[in-house]
Amino acid sequence: MADSIERAFEDVSIKYRKMRFYFYGDAVDVINECEKKHIRIYGFDSFRLFAQGIQPSMEFSPSYDSLEKSLTWDQARADLKKLSESDFVFEIAYERKGDDRRRRKFERRRAGWGIC
């Protein structure tokens, strides 16, 4: 079931299987909306899109688990800005009301890629 962030950005997201990706400007807008709604950012993963599928970036996927909630938005924007000229798309992991499963899934997938 889609949450309020997914619904708000449905028209600009790229859906691939169960993941949603955003281009740089839209990713910043997602972060801003999370800040407005006081939704914690857990981190983001960077990907390249190809005709055959997607490729995760091993070096541009920060995690903000150790940061206070109020610091995650500025840090995410700063880290995204470093990649603004890249050809990456971004999957943003954020807090969902009463549900920690998305965060655990995000961390498990990253561990499988060796980027935790």
Image (cartoon, rainbow, N blue to C red):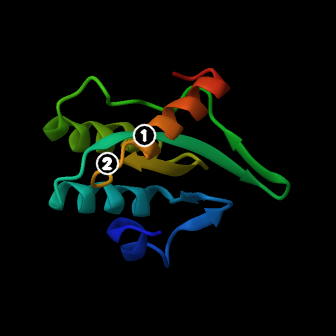
* Residue type, numbered disc 1: Arg
Q: Which residue is mark 1?
A: 103
The CA distance from mark 2 to mark 1 is: 7 Å
> What residue is at 46 percent from the left and 35 percent from the top?
104
Q: Which residue is mark 2?
A: 95
Residue at the far front in the pictured view:
98
> In front: 25, or 69?
69
Q: Residues within 10 Å of mark 1 (few under 14, many from 20)?
A: some
Q: Position of residue 97 (x, y in %)?
A: 27, 55
Residue 113: assigned label: none
Left or right: 114 in relation to 49: left
> What residue is at 65 percent from the left and 26 percent from the top?
112
Helix, strand or loop at disc 2?
loop
* Residue type, numbered disc 2: Glu
> In front: 19, or 28?
19
Tell me: residue 72, above or below residue 19. Answer: above
Q: Position of residue 73 (x, y in %)?
A: 24, 44
Q: State if disc 1 and disc 2 touch (CB < 8 Å).
A: yes
Instruction: Residue 75: name its quadrant.
Output: top left
